Image (cartoon, rainbow, N blue to C red):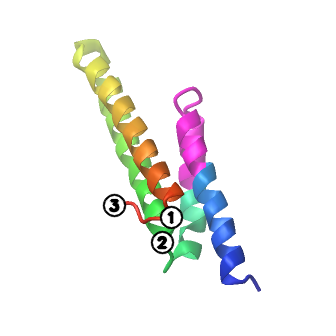
Amino acid sequence: MQTNQEKEKSLKSIVNTVYILQTLSFAIGLTLIIGAIINYVKRDDARDTWLYSHFNWQIRTFWFTLLWLIVGGLLINTGLGIFILMAVSIWLAYRIVKGWLKYFQREEVK
């Protein structure tokens, strides 16, 4: 049986890994999907901890990024798509930075 301290250490490692995977998605898009899968598999383990908000934050980041990547991709031929794709890239970077900063401050992310 894991102690609370061991559990938190394990969860922190997972959250940090997913932020790394999200960052790597700028070069290797598949890592964003891998991070989301990890979040869904391990999220319940984080319930009732300050890290639970990070799991939810990362999951929401994945779904909204995916949505806007699809919209941008569908509109790429209109010219509007490129602006949507640029905006979603900036937004994704913001979400990663904000989440990671809160993580290092040991705070919930909102």
Residue 14 pos. (x, y %): 63, 58
Q: Is residue 25 above or below residue 75?
A: below
Cα distance between the residues tagged 3 and 2: 11 Å
Question: In this figure, which residue is indicated by the disc labeled 3?
Answer: 110
Which quadrant holds the N terminus? bottom right
Residue 50 shown in magenta: no
The residues colored magenta run 18-37
Amino acid type assigned to the residue bearing label 2 in the image: Trp
Q: Are marks 1 and 2 in contact (CB under 8 Å)?
A: yes
Compare residues 17 and 80 and report the one nearer the observer.
17
Q: Amino acid at mark 1?
A: Arg
Circle 2 SS class: loop
Residue at the spot of label 2:
50
Query: Which residue does the numbered mark 1 point to in the structure image?
Result: 106
Q: Which kind of residue does numbered mark 3 sit on? A: Lys
Residue under the image location 31 percent in, 18 percent down: 82
- Residue in view at x 74 percent, y 82 percent: 2
Do the CB atoms of the residues marked 3 and 1 lie less than 8 Å apart?
no
**Mark 3 vs mark 2: which is more N-terminal?**
2
- At 59% from the left edge and 29% from the top edge, which residue is drawn? 28
